[in-house]
Image: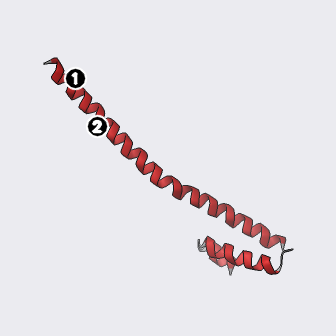
């Protein structure tokens, strides 16, 4: 069932099932390996989700910076007159 969940992209449920199996059968290296792979995928997924808001903020700052530069050019043009 854990493999089905993992294949469907439901990594959290898959990891929970693998942990449940490992609690009962701690010597199962195949389950330990599968859990490790799922946890790596979960970590990468979380890492990407953390970057999305930062990327949005970065784009916003670029727009604000460009707007500020245009305002400075306009201000410089008015000072010359």
**Quadrant of the frame with the C terminus:** top left
> What residue is pinned by disc 1?
76
Give the residue furthest to the top.
80
Q: Is residue 14 above or below residue 65?
A: below
**Quadrant of the frame with the N terminus:** bottom right
Q: Are marks 2 and 1 in contact (CB under 8 Å)?
A: no
Q: Whole-Å distance between the Cαs marked 2 and 1?
A: 14 Å
Q: Residue 44 bears which disc, if any?
A: none
Mark 2 / mark 1, whichever is N-terminal: 2
x, y (%) of residue 70?
Answer: 26, 32
Relative depth, front residue between 9 and 75: 75
Residue occupying the point 74% across, 69% down: 34
x, y (%) of residue 12?
Answer: 62, 72
Element at label 2: helix
Looking at the image, residue 74 sits to the left or right of residue 61; the answer is: left
Residue occupying the point 84% across, 74% down: 28
Looking at the image, can residue 7 be seen? no
Relative depth, front residue between 10 and 46: 46
Give the residue furthest to the right.
27
Q: Is residue 50 above or below residue 24?
A: above
> What residue is pinned by disc 2?
67
Q: Is residue 3 above or below residue 39?
A: below
x, y (%) of residue 24?
Answer: 81, 81
């Amino acid at each position: 069932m854990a493999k089905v969940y993992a294949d469907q992209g439901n990594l959290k449920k898959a990891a929970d099932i693998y942990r449940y199996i490992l609690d009962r059968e701690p010597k199962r290296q195949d389950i330990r390996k599968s859990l490790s792979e799922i946890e790596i995928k979960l970590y990468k997924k979380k890492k990407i989700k953390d970057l999305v808001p930062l990327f949005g903020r970065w784009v916003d700052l670029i727009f604000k910076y460009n707007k500020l530069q245009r305002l400075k050019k306009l201000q410089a043009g008015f000072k010359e007159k």
